[in-house]
Image: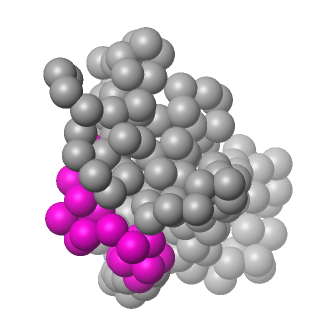
Amino acid sequence: MLDAAVQVILDKGAAVTLAQVAAAAGVSKSGLIHHFGSRDQLVVALVEDTHERFRETVRSHLDLSENYPGKMLRAYVRALCAGSAEAATARDFTSAPMWGGLYTIPAVAPVMEENAAWWEEQLALDGISPERILIVRRAAEGIAMAAVYGEQDESSISTARDLLLELASEGTFRAPL
């Protein structure tokens, strides 16, 4: 049911109804309410699920042979800038414009705060400066959003990914850019 909810929200936005989600999931509206109780509870479950899926995607990009600082940040970059169907899914799950109005639901705010704190903690444990983390993380997210809107082709995503992976390691950027 959550997969159906994701697709309906990506198609219709935050104004989605339980009836639309139920129809997409192939269940009755009462069956959907039985599982989630309310639209807000469905949205909270959906947001929690998408956060966990994205975490799993990032973990799947961890390169355990990289025994130097920045390992988790590089996995984050790979997850968002892989140029694959998996990366597109990761971008859908993290795409603020796609989810826009959901974040105005009061019950979603604590879930978002917990997720943000989790990422800050995980990336801070990575052994590189907070400034470097900020720049690389937000750049990867920006590239992912540009890809969502079709503004970047696979070649430019690959080039940007390589530069961000380099920046996600202590040391200096290679010259020339």
Residue 47 drawn at (x, y percent)? 52, 68
17 over 157 or under it: above or below: below
Residue 165 drawn at (x, y percent)? 41, 42
In which quarter of the view is residue 39 placed?
bottom right
Residue 100 seen in this snapshot: no
Q: Residue at x 64, y 37 (%)?
A: 86
Tally of numbered tags: 0
Where is the N terminus found, in terms of image quarters?
A: bottom right
Residue 17 drawn at (x, y percent)? 52, 57
Residue 55 among those drawn in magenta? no
In which quarter of the view is residue 123 placed?
bottom left
Left or right, 84 with reference to 166: right
Where is the C terminus found, in terms of image quarters?
A: top left
25 over 71 or under it: above or below: above
Q: Residue at x 47, y 51 (%)?
A: 74
Left or right, 145 with reference to 44: left
Query: What kind of secondary structure does the magenta stretch mostly adopt?
Result: helix
Residue 36 drawn at (x, y percent)? 68, 78
Query: According to the image, what is the colour scheme of the structure?
Result: one colour
Left or right, 164 with reference to 50: left
Left or right, 176 with reference to 13: left
128 over 120 or under it: above or below: above
Q: Residue at x 23, y 71 (%)?
A: 130
Residue 140 seen in this snapshot: yes
Q: Residue at x 43, y 61 (%)?
A: 70
Closer to the camera, 87 or 128?
128
Closer to the camera, 151 or 100?
151
In which quarter of the view is residue 31 placed?
bottom right
Closer to the camera, 82 or 33?
82
- The magenta region covers 119-139
Residue 138 among those drawn in magenta? yes
